[in-house]
Amino acid sequence: MNTKMVAGSEEWVSLPGLGLPKIKVRVDSGAKTSALHAVNIMPFQRNSEPWVSFDVFPIQFDGKRVMHCEAQVVDMRHIKSSTGTREMRYVVKTHLKVNEEAWEIEISLTNRDSMGYRMLLGREAMRGKMLVDPESSFMFGELDRQTVEALYNKNTENIEGLRIGILASNPELYSNQRIVEAGEQLGHHIEFFNIKQCYIKLDAKTPEVHYRGGRVLNDLDAVIPRIRPSMTYYGCALTRQFESLGVYALNGSAAITHSRDKLYSLQLLLNNGLDIPITGFANSPLDTNDLIKMVGGSPLIVKLLEGTQGKGVVLAETKKAAESVINAFKSLNANILVQEFIKEANGKDLRCFVIDGKVVAAMQREAPPGEFRANIHLGGTGSVVRITKEERRLAIKAAKAMGLEVAGVDLIRSAKGPLLLEVNSSPGLEGIEGATGKDIAVDMIKAIERNVAKKYTQKLIKTK
C-alpha cells in the first residue's frame, strides 16, 4: 500500500479472526499497544502452544451480545493503563480489517468496562498503514446502533435467570448502565424502573407495586435500590414494599435510611466499636465556642447533615471562620456536624467498595489543588491503592454495622490510625472501576444470585 489511509479519532473496524464484524475503536497514537475489552479470560494449551479463550461484549452497555473468542498467545506484558495502573496482560495476534484492507496486529486483553470504547487502537497497529486526523471521526464510514446490532444477530427471547429491577432516577447514569449490562451478561432479565413512576397499593390481601401504565412488579426476584438523596423517603418506602412482598433487596430500606442520616450512622459506627474523627453536634448558637473546643479547635470541618458528594462541607481554617460558618448554618435552622480536621491526610482519603461482606476494590481519592475534599465529583482523582488489614477490617465491619450488602466505605489515614468518615449506600461505579479495573457491577449481580439462592433454600426448608 503506497498511500496511507487517514483515520479519525474514532472508527468502526473489523476483527474477522475473532468473529467481530464491527467494533468501535478509539484511535490513540499515544498508546503503543492496542487493547480489546475481554472478560472470562482463560488460558489453555492447544498443540502444546499457549492459547486463551475469552468473552467479548462488543457493544458498550449491551450485556446480551457476547462473542466467545479464542486466540494464540504471543506474549505476556506489563502494560500501563490510562489510569496509571500497571497490569499483566495476555497479548494475542489477529487481523484488523479496515474497509477492504487487512493486516495482522497485536492486541492486549483487558477489562475496559469503565472506558467509552470496547477497543483502543494503538500506534503499533497503525504503523505504515494509517495517519491520524484527531479532529475527524468515522473516516471509514459511520454505522448506527441498529445496523451494528443486526450484525451480531441479537436474540433477546427466552431470557433465563432472575428478574431484577433497578430502582433509580437516571437510566443514563454510568453506574445504572453498567449494572444493567452486568445483569444481562450473566443471563438475567434486568430492567430500570424510575422511582418517581412507581406507586404502591397497600392492602391486606393483595399488596402490590405498580409501574407507569399499571404494570404490576410483584413478580421481581430482586431489586437494586440506587436512591438519590432527594428521593430517600419515597425510595425507601418503595423498597420496603418490595421487601414485604418477599422480593430480595440488595440493600434493605432500613439500612439505607440509617446510612442517609449522618449523625445516626456515626452513632451506629461508634456503638460497634469503630473509630471516627472527633465530632460535635449541637443546636444552640450559645454552644459554638465549646463546640469548637470539643473537636480540638480550628481548623475544623463543618458538614450539613443532608449534604452528599462533598456538597455542604466547609473547611474553617480559623476560630473566627468556624464561628461564622457554624452560626450562619444555625441561623438557617440547618442541622450540622462539626468534625476535627485530619491535616496529615493531605487531602486524601480511601474509598473501599464492600459487597456481601468483602472488600472487592479500593481506591485512594486525592483532592485537586486548592481543595480539601477528596471527591471525584469535585475534580479529585482516583488511583488504585493497597489497603492494610486494619483498613479492610474497618470497612467490612462498618458495612455490617449499617446492615448494607453493598457499601462505599470512606476512610481517612490519621496519626491515630484509620478513621471512618462515611458509609454510602448507593456508591458510584465509574470512579472505582476506572481506577482499579475491577468489574464491580458483575460482583453486585453475583451477590444477588447468592442471596436469592440462599433465600429460596431457607424458604424450602421452612415449608418441609
Image (spheres, grey):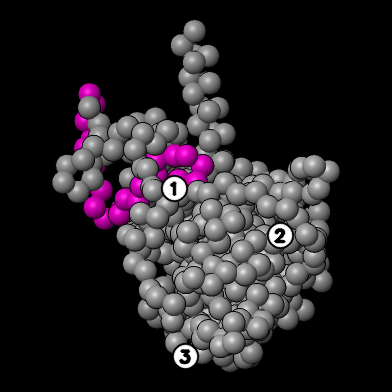
Residue 232's place in the image compared with 248, above or below, is below
> Quick check: is 13 in the magenta stretch?
no
Residue type of the residue flagged with mark 3:
Glu
Q: Which residues are magenta?
A: 184-205
Q: Name the secondary structure under disc 2.
A: strand
The reply to whether the C-beta atoms of the residues labelled 3 and 2 are less than 8 Å apart is no
Residue at the location (25% across, 34% down)?
Answer: 208
Residue 287's place in the image compared with 454, above or below, is below
Q: Position of residue 277 (x, y in %)?
A: 68, 67
Q: Pointer 1: what residue? A: 64
Residue at the location (73% across, 81% down)?
Answer: 346
Residue type of the residue flagged with mark 2:
Val
Q: Name the secondary structure under disc 3.
A: loop
Residue at the location (53% across, 49% down)?
Answer: 67
**How far separated are the C-alphas under marks 1 and 3?**
33 Å
**How far separated are the C-alphas under marks 2 and 1?**
25 Å
The reply to whether the C-beta atoms of the residues labelled 1 and 3 are less than 8 Å apart is no
Residue 149's place in the image compared with 205, above or below, is below
Extreme-top residue of the structure: 464
